[in-house]
Image (cartoon, rainbow, N blue to C red):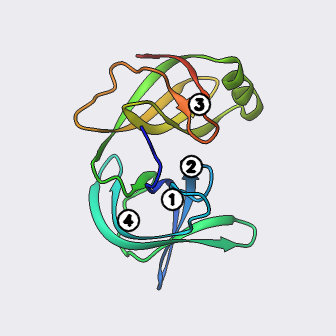
Amino acid sequence: MDISNQVYIWVTNVDTSDEGAVLNGLSFDGEYGFGVEDMREYSGTLAMLSNKQHSIIRAELSTIHISGKGVLWNINVEQLPDVPFLLTSNIELTGPVIKNIGLSPTEEAFEIFQRDREGSYPVCSTRMVGILNHSNESDVLIGFTTGDDNLNSLEELEFIEWGIEVGKVTVE
């Protein structure tokens, strides 16, 4: 799935204030999450997709830097879903579909998993974007698609940030 020119942020923590909320998480493009190099602001329609909620909002979203925390996102809304959730300008996405997967990683992916031991990684295929939660015990894919795709089978999966193939994936 092409993530260019779209906001894709996997939100894992929210701190609220009188001016709105500060979001922490993972950007899918390896930059600021806005799908365009060096873009730091977005104004318009956003979807918030979580296990319990799917809502469409109009909002102002921008990056901010907080000492000791790095680059985060500021959004001017009061109501947000429980974390984690996907914040995206691609309002046609549905999900999440959560699947335990079997994974035979490529050599490059194996090196990443050895380095990190466990972690969450933005991934994509031609049909979905998602988060791969990897640990030594299991691999769980949290996927978002257009339509009613239940992710019962997957073609190639890649780490979005690096453009590296993840490896052979089987859906359990």
At numbered mark 2, what does the secondary structure look like: helix, strand or loop? loop
The answer to which of 67 and 123 lies nearer the viewer is: 123
Quarter of the rendering occupied by the N terminus: top left
Mark sitting on residue 29:
2
Mark sitting on residue 80:
4
| Residue bearing the label numbered 3 | 134
Q: Position of residue 43 (x, y in %)?
A: 40, 72
Q: Residue flagged by tag 4: what amino acid is it? A: Leu
**Foreground label between 4 and 2:** 2
| Residue bearing the label numbered 1 | 34
Q: Marks 2 and 3: in contact by CB < 8 Å?
A: no
Q: Residue flagged by tag 3: what amino acid is it? A: His
Q: Position of residue 143 (x, y in %)?
A: 40, 36
The residue carrying pointer 1 sits among few (fewer than 14), some (14 to 19) or many (20 or more) residues within 10 Å by Cα, namely: many
Q: Residue flagged by tag 2: what amino acid is it? A: Asp
- In 3D space, how far apart are the residues under numbered discs 3 and 4 (Cα atoms)? 26 Å
At numbered mark 3, what does the secondary structure look like: helix, strand or loop? strand
The residue carrying pointer 3 sits among few (fewer than 14), some (14 to 19) or many (20 or more) residues within 10 Å by Cα, namely: some
Q: Residue at x 39, y 35 (%)?
A: 128
